[in-house]
Image (tube, grey):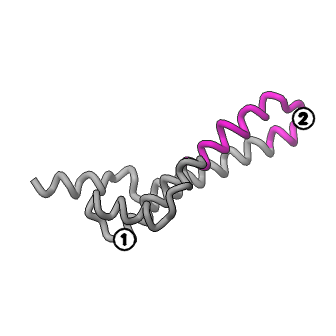
Amino acid sequence: MELLTNINKKEREVKFASILELDINDADRLSHALIDIAGSVNEIYINILPAIFKINEKDKLAEALWNIKEEFRHIDYHIRYAELTDLFYVKKERNED
């Protein structure tokens, strides 16, 4: 995760904007989504899941599962907000042929 956040926000935006020929708002949305998704995936697989297998109490297990649900909700939000499943970034390039 540290590698992703070492590049400052403006550099990420400019890179995406120039390479993908996006306006700065779309570039910001894309870079922000990818960083936040990586953070949520990291939280689930590095922190929450290993802890789940050590839990012996119903309430604590329910809380851990709730936290996973919230991370997936956060991932879903960014997928939708940045239109990652619509591949609009790729389509733009293909339409120029």
Q: Residues within 10 Å of mark 2 (few under 14, many from 20)?
A: few
Query: Mark 1 belongs to which amino acid?
Result: Ile
Q: Residue 92 appears at what percent x and percent y?
A: 22, 58
Write down the quadrant of residue 19 in the picture. Answer: bottom left
Q: Residue furthest left?
A: 97
Q: Residue 43 appears at what percent x and percent y?
A: 67, 44
Q: Which residue is mark 2?
A: 57
At 38% from the left and 50% from the top, the residue drawn is 85
Q: Main secondary structure of the magenta part?
A: helix
Q: Which residue is mark 1?
A: 24
Q: Residue 68 appears at what percent x and percent y?
A: 68, 44
Whether residue 49 sits left or right of residue 84 in the image: it is right
Label 2, label 1: how many angstroms apart (C-alpha)? 48 Å
Magenta stretch, residue numbers: 38-62
Q: Residue 4 appears at what percent x and percent y?
A: 53, 51
Query: Mark 2 belongs to which amino acid?
Result: Glu
Mark 2 secondary-structure assignment: loop
Q: Is residue 14 magenta?
A: no
At 13% from the left and 57% from the top, the residue drawn is 96
Whether residue 9 sits left or right of residue 63 in the image: it is left
> In the figure, 83 relative to 48: above or below?
below
Q: Please tell me which of labels 2 and 1 falls first in the chain.
A: 1
